[in-house]
Image (cartoon, rainbow, N blue to C red):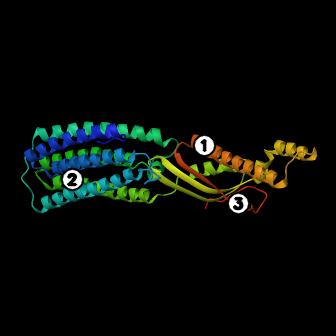
């Protein structure tokens, strides 16, 4: 059981805690390895949800003088710790117990309580899994599910999706293992189901671990978004060249974009043509003034115009692309190598 937002994760934490208690009671009554796997799985989910909840809360703190990019990386860190917990508790304990049961089969005690607990768990986990799929469908837009999974910057949502899938499938595997063990009298079916559940958790934990490692390192933003940003800049009459584009994922669905921009001085200068004409006319009419004063005032006007244009572009980028929470367009005075506008991504 899992969910993406802070409030939903907290509710999932309570739900998984309750399922953990129920499943451990069922294990004590049945002595089933598969039931122990389910209980440990719920325990791992409970600890996982606690870590995710803490990570979400800490990542929402605003940027300050110590961390200029904010605390969004906290979500990645705690999601990584969660993946480690899934691997140790979910995979390690259940696989070990399953293998131990193969070599030293326990005496099973079958009861309708076991199946009732698993049925309740299937309903709860299945419901949350469907809810998670709906949330993913809303967020992924036109992307394929696999592309969204590979590129999503929200490790909480990825953990939600995979955990609920494994939880739902794991209940079915546990039911099958316990049922076959009861029908055949062979405890190996029960032990095998425990090992399968543990290996599934291990695979998910490893994948989430590597993905969160990438997010902590700060990968570049999605290529399609970068292309849209560059296309917008290319269309601006005030820009001639864009060089050294640098992007970074700084938090869940929060990106940084920086670039060196060669602004068109002629375009900015022409905005003051009326003022220049008035000044020239004044000089010709004999008004007092000298070249230094004129040049200094014109330079101030150009700098003010450049500053206003940078502010406009950055504000427009944030408006068009809300996920760009940090935008830095540095002035680059290198001359263009062509009369055409160029965009140099790297």
Residue 91 x/y as whole percent? 24, 57
Q: Residue furthest right?
A: 285
Residue at the disc numbered 3: 333
Which residue position is annotated with label 1?
Answer: 315
Residue underneath mark 2: 193
- Measured Cα–Cα span from mark 1 to mark 3: 22 Å
Q: Which mark lies nearer to you, 2 or 1?
A: 1
Give the quadrant of the C terminus. bottom right
Residue 119 drawn above or below residue 295: above
> Which mark lies nearer to you, 3 or 2?
3
Depth check: give the residue in front, 227 or 240.
240
Q: Nearer the viewer, residue 66 or 72?
A: 66
Q: Earlier in the sequence, mark 3 or mark 2?
A: 2
**Sequence-wise first label, 1 or 3:** 1
Near mark 3 (Cα within 10 A), the count class, few <14, some 14-19 or many ≥20, is few
Residue sitting at 27 percent across and 46 percent down?
Answer: 50
């Amino acid at each position: 059981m899992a969910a993406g937002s802070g409030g939903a994760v907290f509710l999932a934490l309570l739900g998984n805690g309750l399922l953990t208690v129920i499943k451990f009671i069922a294990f004590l009554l049945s002595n089933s390895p598969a039931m122990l796997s389910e209980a440990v799985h719920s325990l791992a989910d409970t600890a996982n949800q606690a870590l995710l909840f803490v990570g979400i809360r800490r990542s929402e703190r605003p940027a300050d003088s110590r961390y200029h990019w904010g605390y969004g990386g906290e979500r990645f860190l705690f999601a990584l710790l969660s993946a480690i917990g899934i691997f140790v508790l979910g995979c390690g304990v259940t696989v070990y117990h399953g293998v131990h049961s193969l070599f030293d089969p326990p005496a099973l005690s079958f009861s309708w309580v076991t199946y009732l607990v698993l049925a309740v768990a299937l309903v709860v986990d299945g419901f949350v899994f469907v809810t998670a799929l709906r949330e993913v469908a809303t967020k992924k837009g036109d992307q394929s599910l696999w592309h969204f999974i590979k590129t999503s910057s929200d490790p909480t949502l990825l953990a939600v999706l995979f955990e609920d899938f494994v939880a739902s499938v794991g209940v079915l595997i546990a039911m099958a293992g316990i049922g076959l063990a009861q029908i055949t009298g062979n405890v190996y079916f029960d032990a095998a189901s425990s090992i399968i559940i543990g290996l599934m958790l291990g695979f998910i934990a490893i994948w989430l671990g590597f993905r969160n490692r990438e997010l902590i390192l700060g990968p570049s933003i999605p290529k399609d978004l970068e292309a849209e940003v560059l296309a917008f800049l290319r269309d601006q009459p005030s820009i001639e060249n864009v060089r050294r584009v640098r992007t970074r994922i700084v938090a869940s669905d929060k990106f940084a974009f920086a670039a060196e921009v060669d602004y068109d001085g002629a375009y900015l200068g022409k905005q003051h043509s009326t003022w220049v004409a008035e000044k020239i006319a004044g000089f010709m009419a004999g008004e007092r003034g000298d070249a230094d004063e004129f040049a200094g005032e014109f330079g101030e006007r150009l700098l003010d115009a450049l500053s206003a244009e940078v502010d406009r572009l950055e504000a427009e980028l944030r408006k068009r692309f809300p996920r760009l929470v940090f935008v830095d367009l540095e002035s680059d005075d290198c001359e263009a190598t062509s009369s055409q506008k160029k965009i140099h991504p790297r």
